[in-house]
Image (spheres, rainbow, N blue to C red):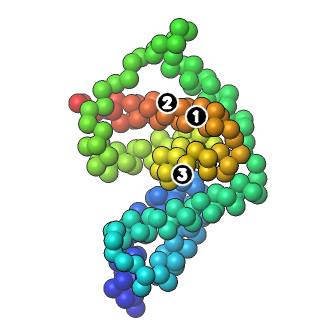
Amino acid sequence: MTSPGEQDIQQHRAYLMRYALLQLRNQEVAEDVVQETLLAALQGLAGFSGNSSQRTWLTGILKHKIIDVMRRKAREQPLTINDDESEADAIDAIFSANGHWQQPPANWGDPAKSLEDSKFREMFEICCRVMPERTARAFMMREVMEMSTEEICKELKITQANLWVILHRARLSLRACLEIKWFGTRTN
């Protein structure tokens, strides 16, 4: 039988799992990280002060567990570089020869409203999953996990200039995907 505190923590499992899957792109590893997060939360439940929501607290624990996994993975195998060519082709398709947009960005309406929509967040996750792994990883480290440029560069063993290019590509990819899969299907 679980205590009320344990039940409260367990209700966030599905959210934590989606978050971990988006970051790690591996079902088994995500399950392990979520399990470790829940275990750490249960062990530290007495120390939870309530200054933030329980979900925010759990997400903070999960972020640290994910960073640990990413660091371990980075030590074990080098990043692949073979996705650069397909990324360059995708970027070239967006711009004309003189550097202007082939098709200007669509009107996205109120972005804050979109973020409140669970279907939008689901589509955002799908769009992140279709990005090349290195690109998505850098984007998530920067925009979701809020790691500093220095931390990301150290973790990925890249220069700041390379990081900015990767982040630019990630934003272009995300824009294109969301315009097709979300904003292109909606009327503003």
Of the two numbered discs 2 and 3 on the same chain, state the one appearing first in sequence: 3
Q: Residues within 10 Å of mark 2 (few under 14, many from 20)?
A: some
Q: Nearer the viewer, mark 1 or mark 2?
A: 1
Q: Which amino acid does label 3 sit on?
A: Met
Disc marking residue 164: 1
Marks 2/3 in contact by CB < 8 Å: the verdict is no
| Percent position of residue 85, x then y | 68, 28
Could you tell me which secondary element the residue under label 1 belongs to? helix
Quote the CA–CA distance across marks 2 and 3: 20 Å
The image quarter in which residue 120 lies: top left
Quote the CA–CA distance across marks 3 and 1: 14 Å
Check the image and report above or below for 51 versus 159: below
Q: Which amino acid does label 2 sit on?
A: Leu
Disc marking residue 14: none
Q: In which quarter of the image is the C terminus?
A: top left
Could you tell me which secondary element the residue under label 2 belongs to? helix
- 49 displayed left or right of 157: left
Q: What residue type is labelled 1?
A: Trp
Disc marking residue 147: 3
Q: Residues within 10 Å of mark 3 (few under 14, many from 20)?
A: some
- 33 displayed left or right of 112: right
Q: In which quarter of the image is the N terminus?
A: bottom left
Of the two numbered discs 1 and 2 on the same chain, state the one appearing first in sequence: 1
